[in-house]
Image (cartoon, helix red, strand yellow):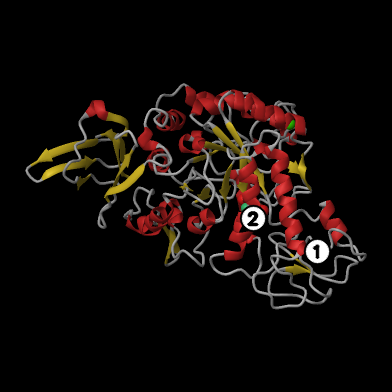
Amino acid sequence: MGVFPSPEWLKSAVFYEIYPQSFRDSNADGIGDLNGIIEKLDYIKGLGCNALWINPCFESPFKDAGYDVSDYCKIAPRYGTNDDMIRLFRQAHAKGMRVLLDLVPGHTSEEHEWFRQSTKVERNEYSDRFIWTDGAFSGYALPFIGGESKRDAAYILNFFKCQPALNYGFAKIDRPWQMSTDSPAARATKQAMVDVMRYWLSRGCDGFRVDMARSLVKNDDAHHHATIEAWKEMLSPVKQEFPESAFVSEWAAPQDALSAGFDMDFYLNHEKTAVREANGYNLLARRFVKDGEQEKDLSYFTADSGTSIKAFLADYLPEYEATKDRGYFCFLTCNHDTVRLAPRLSDLEIKIAYGMLLTMPGVPFVYYGDEIAMRYYALPTKEGGYFRTGSRTPMQWGAGANLGFSQGAKEDLYLPVDPSQDAPTVEKQEKDPDSMLHWTKLLLGLRPGHRALRADGGFEVVAAPENGRSFAYLRSGDDGERLLIALNPGLEDERVALPDGLNPAESEDCLAAIGQVRPESGEEGNALSLGAQSFAVLRC
Ligand code: NOJ
Ligand code: CA
């Protein structure tokens, strides 16, 4: 068990991440909104997703797409009202779905009233809500801004210039202006964040995805022990009052994140961190190596990369083993900060990738549009997106104006829709049984009937050849069910030996397949023959 008991519903949860600006515009102003999300709840449920994570939709000047919050308890007017959000909670619940909002605890917008008050020369309730040095000229090792306020001090940033860091104190104090994690100021910040969580949870919200969860306490050690303590303090009263609430961290170090009381942590594309050597997630789909002038794609899912699954497992397995009884380390198809897999990977490569990503342990997250393999579309930056903007374009629903995203004028759209003639849409893919949409539905559709695929189902590596491309693993349920999952993303046929006692039967036991995957038995025992670019889920 984790620090706090995790709600039972997470075991069978599948999340759909919605970037609200770009999902569905219900009132033709060119920007997605909450009523648009409500319209599409049945579509999301039909995919096999029973939970949502909505990126920040609170009042904001939108210099970082809403991750610069100016009022945590008010829905940004461009998305609707607080009442619309409450209606969204109710309608989702009526359909058996859950809704996580995005909590940004590490910083506010420079336009938040707390920060405005904090910049004043006169001392007030918010003077120490942010981290200020002792003079406008006195900088520090952390990023800071001086010369912007009447207050004769510089303030510390958490991310962009528009995002001053909230004050949770310092783990190691090396300047007189730094406060302890137990100072009244740090305690007031924690209380304010608990109040924000309670505000939304008491109105029907089911939990939060937490932005930069490890960033709170400054000068913390490599494992963020002081930040872990801060989270336990904040989550303790919240989990007590809302035991069904769920929390997923943007931390990318599950052992630390689960020790802090989170139910789940994301496997992200962050570069190597102080606590993990190589990033397994990047080895799967984003491993590029300079080869003279050229850049070689050595990602495991890239058909001709020639790489083995071993390097991924060296990162993943220790994390999985250390956390499997305490919570979940979650795979995503992509997110709003990451370049989508399409068009760099082909549809076939992506189907095999989803085969694995959506059947590994933990709670899976599907980024809006990935179910139709929407393509990364390079665009000039919008709202602090920079390269990320290309993964944030409007959802492609069908034929017609703006591919069904909005009835508004093309010039008014939040971002342009993919202009390609062959841009994938939900409408086209619904009619095509071989589409990415049908494949995603098929994979997610296996979960309700197979306890082996639950977040907490067993996981065991069956084959991971050093000199091969294949990967086979067993998932097992508390009802004794065993599913063998095997893939070969490479271009050559392969054969992997199966341990004694593992006897996948032929065709009728195949629950999902791409290409040729055939069990074989001979004198040397059981084996699995895996054709080039193949994937299968087999009952054993
Ligand atoms: C991580 C979020 O996912 C990203 O979109 C944002 O820009 C930063 N945190 C800052 O809040
Ligand atoms: Ca709108």
Contact check, label 1 and label 2, Cβ < 8 Å? no
Query: Does residue 299 sit above or below 484 in this rendering?
Result: below
Give the Cα distance between marks 1 and 2: 20 Å
Residue under pointer 2: 233
Task: Provide residue 330's location: percent of width, then percent of height.
Answer: 48, 47
Q: Position of 395 compared to 538: left or right?
A: right
Please give the residue where the numbered disc 1 appears in the rendered image: 128
Q: Residue furthest left?
A: 523
Q: Residue visible at 76% across and 66% down?
A: 131
Q: Is residue 269 visible?
A: no
- Asked if residue 495 can be seen in this view, the reply is yes
Looking at the figure, which quarter contains the C terminus?
top left
- Rendered-image quarter of ligand 2: top right
User: Is 390 or 42 nearer to us in this picture?
Assistant: 42
Specify which label sits upstream in the sequence, 1 or 2. 1
Q: Quadrant of residue 472?
A: top left
Q: Quadrant of residue 74?
A: top right
Q: Position of residue 42 (x, y in %)?
A: 57, 23
Q: How many marks?
A: 2
Q: Which residue sits at x=81%, y=52%?
A: 112
Lateral position of residue 418 relative to residue 471, left or right: right
Q: Nearer the viewer, residue 419 or 412?
A: 412
> Camera-side residue: 212 or 533?
212
- 302 left or right, relative to 86: left
